[in-house]
Every structure is written in C-alpha cells, then in structure tokens.
C-alpha cells in the first residue's frame, strides 16, 4: 500500500535550523535504520467528525471492533517476575488475567469464573492456583481445572471443558501483548518496523524506573492525539520553543495493512523556526542538555562545547561517555537516539520513544464506561549497570484528573511539568468538541504534521466498517 504524495510540504526549516532528516544525514554516528527508512504511506483523511469523541454507540463499536480485535499491551514481564505471579488487565469493562506460568512463559485468560462469572484476579498477586472467592472453584495457573467443591453436582463440568478461556499472547521487548480475537494476525506482524528500529536500544532489558497512570477527562483518542504531533508545542509548551525543533519534525507512516506504525522524529536541542532569530544552535542544545543532565546524571558536569564546530556530535559524545560510565559497558547509540525525540506509535494505543534522554513508553486506555474519560500510563525505561541486579519495577503512581504530575511523579524531571501542560488542555478539548456548531462539527487537520492522527482515524474507520 505505497502511497507517497508529491503535493505536501514536509516540515519547515532553514539553512541553520535544519529538518530532522537533514540533521540525521549530517550526524557522525548515524548508522541506524531509523535515520534511513522513511514512511511508505501518506494519509489523506483530514476531517474528524467530533461525535466520535463522545458518542456512546461509537465507543461501543470501538470496543467490539478495535479493542477486542487488536494486539494490546497488557503488562511488562518485569511486572510478574516469578512463576505464579499474575496481574489483571482491564479493557473497558472486560478484564483479562496475565500470568507467568514458567520461567519464560506466560498465558492470558478471560478474568471470569466459569461457574457464575466472578473475577478471579482483581489485583497483582501470586500463587500456584486461581481460586474463585465465591464458591472456591480452582484452576492451576496453566488454566486447567483442578477443583470444584461438591463436584457431584457439576457432572457436566469436566477437565476437558472446564479450563479457563485463554486469549492469544505475544511478546516483544519485555512487553506482553494479548489479543482477544482468535483469528487475529500473528503478533509479530503487528509491530512492523519497530523491532528493527529498536534493535540497539535493547528495550527488553530495561526496567521501569518511574511509572504513573493519569486519569484524563477526555476521550482516549483526544488523549492520545495530544501526544502524536509536535505542532502543539508553540501553543502548549512555549517554554520549549528555544530547544525543540517542532516545525522541523519528520512524520512517517509505515503501514502494510496489518502493522499500522506512525513515527514522529522531532529534533532535540535544536531551535524551532518559531524561536527568536537570535537563538543559536549551541544555546539550544545546551538548554536541552541541562534538563537531561538534571534528570539522569545530576552529578555530571555539563559538556564544554566549541560553538565553532558542529555541536550535535560533541553533545552526543559527552552523553555516550556518561552512559558508558553509568552502565559499566560501552554505550554505542547513534547521535539522534541520544539527542532527538523519535516516537513510534503502534496502533491502537502504545507509543515507544527511541530516545535515551527521554526513554518513555506510553499506553493509552479507554475509561471503563465513560467515553469522555481515559487513561495515559507512562513508564520511564532505563538500563541498569552491568554486574548489578536488575532493579524491581517502580510501582505505578495513580494520578487523578485534578492532580499534577510534577507533585505526584517528580521523577519525570522537567517532563512532569510538560505533561501537566498537556493534561490542562484536554478537558477543554473534550468540552470544545461538544460545543461546535452542528454545521461545522469536525476537526480540520493539517496536511503533514498531523499525519499520525489522520492514519489512526483511517484505520479506526476501516476496522469499524468490517
Ligand atoms: S462464581 Fe466462581 S466459584 Fe462460584
Ligand atoms: Fe505536549
């Protein structure tokens, strides 16, 4: 499905404020597929009917045709480290249990007792069996039936037909995905370019170093769309303009009809075309470096930059050395992964940052029952030092719709206040789509910078129509 449009201007830069792709081409440590492989599909969808952000019937269709048929990120393997550990994963009102059944093997089941439906797992727990709290039916962790009190009264339930109902499972990079559709395409086919582009990033061996989940008063798509373009930086995060090349971002869609992958590549430490003319590249990069140093290496000296030489390789070398020291093994990541913000969006609900400075993972989820609410869960995924034990994952901090990330999850450093700026917008967006003139009841997307949002709505339409 290759579609490349010739009529689109792909970003706005200048000779000294280059586009993301131009910067990656100039980098001295650039040998990486993320810098070479551009997208193969340019979406055209440009008007989003607002009712899909609140209509109950639309949300019901999404649940049935998207959430119950897509590969969904349920948890990370580090969340259930020992055999018998399990965790519930809720998708709307439907719940699944993810359990570690052996050292390196996992299963997922519908979280519903085969007797009268009681949920079998409502919180992270551990054990050799699932025991229903109501009438004490029991299953082994592999899902096989092991005990029914007064079995003489349930002769119709046998080991053959009494196993817990399993759903498909997929694993990549420490993430455990499930799919409730027995006819789903193989998990590996849903990730497209992502495993190849994340090859040297080694996301599997990272641990969750910080973690929160924020309840948001907005539909899950509005919530996700607030993190799918850097066009909003000038309006929402004006303080980032001097060191974030928002207008120079590159957007790619990698799509083969099965894997729907969006990519946003925003130059870090690079003055935006919106920034004052006097801001130099050296100033921009030093502004960004100070934030990253404070978050990951608070004791490190800032680099001494020669402003007459290209600054990106100097900063990248400084950062590679710091990481090499911290990890006790060589850090060999390319310049762009150390400096920029390459974000990979995997349909329908996950975002992976291919960034050592901002090593984040996002999971968006609809609310259990209200289409005008949703969740964003954010993990910071870091490597631990060679020869040390992998740290336990940081527990998830639950954050309410009126609370601030900077108060509840300060480990996210300067990004905590940035998230707060995004979350402040979202209830206004939800209320605004409700307030539009019925004769002009749609969002008008840009030609280029909102590519990923466009593609997501195309896929949503395709799936709902099936
Ligand atoms: S509902 Fe589970 S044992 Fe009765
Ligand atoms: Fe933002």
Image (cartoon, helix red, strand yellow):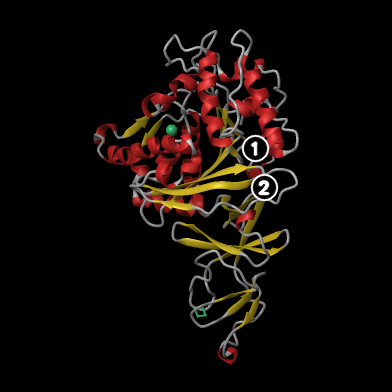
Mark 2 beta carbon near ligand 2 (under 8 Å): no
12 relative to 336, above or below: above
Q: Is residue 314 visible?
A: yes
Quadrant in the picture for residue 195? top right
Q: Earlier in the sequence, mark 1 or mark 2?
A: 2
Q: Position of residue 255 (x, y in %)?
A: 60, 34
User: Residue 350's spot in the image, x, y percent?
Assistant: 54, 43
Mark 2 lies on residue: 172
Residue position for label 1? 194
Between the C-alphas of marks 1 and 2, the distance is 10 Å
Which SS class for mark 2?
strand
- The residue positioned 44% from the left and 9% from the top of the image is 277
Which quadrant of the figure contains the N terminus? top right
User: Foreground: 268 or 97?
Assistant: 268
Percent position of residue 436, x then y: 26, 35
Query: Residue at (53%, 71%) from the top-left corner?
Result: 120
Neighbours of disc 1 within 10 Å: few (<14), some (14-19), many (20+): many
């Amino acid at each position: 499905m290759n579609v490349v449009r010739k009529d689109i201007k792909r970003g706005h830069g200048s000779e000294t404020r280059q586009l993301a792709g131009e910067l990656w081409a100039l980098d001295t440590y650039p040998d990486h597929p993320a810098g070479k492989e551009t997208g193969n599909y340019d979406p055209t969808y440009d008007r989003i009917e607002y009712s899909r952000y609140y209509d109950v019937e639309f949300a019901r269709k999404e649940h049935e045709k998207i959430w119950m048929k897509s590969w969904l990120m349920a948890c990370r393997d580090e969340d259930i480290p020992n055999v018998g550990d399990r965790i519930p994963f809720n998708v709307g009102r439907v719940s699944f249990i993810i359990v570690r059944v052996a050292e390196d093997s996992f299963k997922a089941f519908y979280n519903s007792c085969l007797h009268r439906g009681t949920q079998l797992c409502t919180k992270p727990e551990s054990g050799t069996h699932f025991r229903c709290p109501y009438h004490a039916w029991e299953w082994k962790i592999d899902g096989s039936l092991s005990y029914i009190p007064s079995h003489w009264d349930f002769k119709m339930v046998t080991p053959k037909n009494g196993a817990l109902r399993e759903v498909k499972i997929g694993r990549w990079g420490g993430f455990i995905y499930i799919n409730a559709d027995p006819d789903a395409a193989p998990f590996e086919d849903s990730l497209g370019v992502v495993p190849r582009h994340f090859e040297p990033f080694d996301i599997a061996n990272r641990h969750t170093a910080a973690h929160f989940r924020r309840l948001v008063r907005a539909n899950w798509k509005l919530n996700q769309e607030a993190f799918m373009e850097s066009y909003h930086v000038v309006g929402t995060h004006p303080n980032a303009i001097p060191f974030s090349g928002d207008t120079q971002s590159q957007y790619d869609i990698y799509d083969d009809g099965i894997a729907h992958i969006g990519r946003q590549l925003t130059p870090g430490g690079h003055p935006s075309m919106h920034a004052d003319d006097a801001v130099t590249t050296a100033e921009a990069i030093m502004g960004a470096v100070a934030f990253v140093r404070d978050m990951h290496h608070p004791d490190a000296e800032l680099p001494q930059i020669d402003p007459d030489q290209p600054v990106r390789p100097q900063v990248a070398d400084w950062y590679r050395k710091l990481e090499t020291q911290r990890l006790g093994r060589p850090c060999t990541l390319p310049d762009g992964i150390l400096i920029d913000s390459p974000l990979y969006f995997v349909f329908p609900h996950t975002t992976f940052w291919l960034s050592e400075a901002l090593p984040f993972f996002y999971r968006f989820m609809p609310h259990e029952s209200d289409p005008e609410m949703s969740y964003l869960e954010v993990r910071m995924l870091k490597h631990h030092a060679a020869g040390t034990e992998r740290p336990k994952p940081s527990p998830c901090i639950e954050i309410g719709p009126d609370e601030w990330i900077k108060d509840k999850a300060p480990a996210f450093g300067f990004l905590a206040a940035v998230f707060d700026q995004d979350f402040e917008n979202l209830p206004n967006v939800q209320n605004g789509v409700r307030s539009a003139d019925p004769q002009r009841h749609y969002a008008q997307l840009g030609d280029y910078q909102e590519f990923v949002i466009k593609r997501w709505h195309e896929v949503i339409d395709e799936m709902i129509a099936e």
